[in-house]
Image: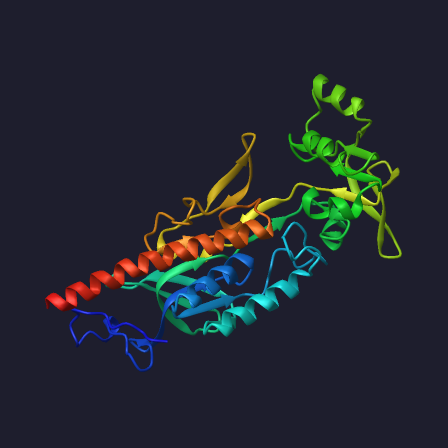
């Protein structure tokens, strides 16, 4: 894959020169685009860029958000496919078109001194240089501090009805209230099951209107703090309250917090913003426009790092859109360089 020379630079400044044979700049391997994160967004974007004949490196820490889930849903043509299978197929597609994929974490990113591109430092210490960055590192789900939730997360402890509602439909479902959206969650999950119980836990007391709505839909409300789960034969069987009472349930809905994996962007002056819902902070995300452009020129984001509630198919689409925008930006850059070289 051809690597462009940076024109009109002092030949004595090795950092400004990309070697056409090795693709290195100042001793560091240089790519058109480094994609940080190898989930649906990152791999989709990498395929688009590789097919556009761009040199692409995907750096994947191997920590997909949906790893605990056995299957994914709502992705046309891939419904019921295990997440790991989708990602394996995606990695094969990236490499088929000449892209590279490595498993590693990124610990730092910075703009090069001349402002023409970025240096990315991997956990293994290997630095690489890129003209543009596509950040698709996703997020970390922060679960309420109830013993047993983490062990059942993605199995019977759930949060998205469109991802898991069909699988637990008609079963006894509990909704753990930790914020003002719990009533709406309970009313939503009632679409999938006639047996829904709202556990007040640490959430606010419903209003009179909300109590009426819950009663009209046959949703029970249980007071008291939840202290744990009952599990039999590796399956959730009940929700345990502080007084010792156990309410039989086969699924429990929680509202996690969403923390963007974006600490390594601090060196670029890019900080995560607070994500809010009903005036309540529910996590962090990296702000961007619809095509993934951040406030740092040359850095775009896609997937859950920018859209905490985006499903897999939405993340993949965002990766495609951001990649197309990056390629268009690089084309403009290539043309400008070529015109400058011709004039010189």
Residue pictured at 72% horizontal, 17% vertical: 208
Which image quadrant: the N terminus? bottom left
Q: Residue at x 75, y 55 (%)?
A: 151
Residue 144 seen in render: no
Looking at the image, which is closer to me, 31 or 254? 31
Is 95 rendered above or below residue 171? below
Residue 45 is situated, as x and y percent measured from the top left of the image, at 47, 60
Q: How is the image coloured?
A: rainbow
Check the image and name the residue furthest to the top: 208
| Outermost residue toward the left in this view | 344
Tell me the residue at 42%/46% (across/down): 288
Q: Left or right: where does residue 42 sit relative to residue 219?
A: left
Residue with the most extreme front position: 77
Residue 161: % across, % down: 70, 42
- Residue 170 appears in which quarter of the rendering? top right
The answer to whether one can see residue 53 in this image is: yes
Percent coordinates x, y for residue 234 in the rendering: 85, 57
Residue 39's spot in the image, x, y percent? 56, 60
Classify the position of the C terminus by image quarter: bottom left
Closer to us: 137 or 270: 137
Q: Tell me what residue is drawn at x 53 percent, y 63 percent.
A: 38
Quadrant position of residue 125:
bottom left
Give the left or right position of residue 322, taking residue 63 as reference: left
* Count of residue discs: 0
Q: Is residue 82 left or right of residue 295?
A: right
Q: Nearer the viewer, residue 279 or 161?
A: 161
């Amino acid at each position: 894959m051809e690597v462009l020379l940076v024109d009109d630079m002092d030949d004595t400044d090795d950092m400004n020169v990309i070697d056409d044979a090795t693709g290195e700049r100042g001793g560091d391997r240089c790519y058109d685009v480094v994609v940080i994160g190898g989930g649906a967004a990152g791999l989709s974007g990498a395929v688009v860029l590789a097919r556009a004949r761009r040199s692409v490196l995907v750096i994947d820490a191997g920590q997909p958000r949906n790893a605990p889930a056995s299957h994914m849903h709502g992705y046309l043509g891939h419904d019921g496919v295990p997440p790991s299978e989708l990602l394996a197929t995606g990695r094969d597609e990236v490499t088929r078109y000449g892209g590279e994929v490595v498993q590693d974490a990124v610990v730092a990113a910075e703009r090069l001194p001349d402002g023409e591109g970025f240096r990315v430092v991997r956990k293994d210490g290997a630095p690489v240089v890129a003209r543009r960055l596509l950040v698709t590192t996703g997020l970390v789900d922060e679960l309420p501090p109830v013993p047993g939730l983490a062990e059942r997360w993605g199995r019977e402890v759930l949060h998205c009805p469109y991802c898991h509602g069909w699988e637990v439909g008609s079963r006894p479902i509990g909704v753990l209230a930790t914020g003002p959206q719990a009533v709406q969650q309970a009313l939503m999950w009632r679409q999938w099951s006639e047996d829904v119980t709202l556990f007040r836990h640490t959430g606010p007391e419903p209003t009179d209107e909300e109590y009426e709505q819950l009663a009209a839909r046959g949703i029970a409300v249980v007071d008291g703090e939840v202290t744990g789960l009952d599990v039999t034969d590796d399956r959730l069987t009940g929700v345990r309250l502080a007084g010792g009472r156990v309410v039989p349930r086969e699924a429990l809905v929680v509202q996690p917090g969403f923390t963007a994996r974006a600490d390594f962007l601090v060196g670029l002056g890019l900080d995560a913003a607070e994500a809010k819902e009903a005036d309540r902070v529910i996590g962090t995300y990296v702000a961007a426009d619809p095509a993934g452009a951040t406030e740092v020129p040359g850095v775009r984001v896609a997937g859950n790092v920018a859209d905490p509630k985006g499903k897999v198919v939405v993340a993949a689409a965002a990766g495609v859109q951001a990649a197309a925008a990056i390629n268009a930006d690089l084309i403009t850059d290539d043309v400008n360089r070529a015109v400058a070289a011709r004039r010189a």
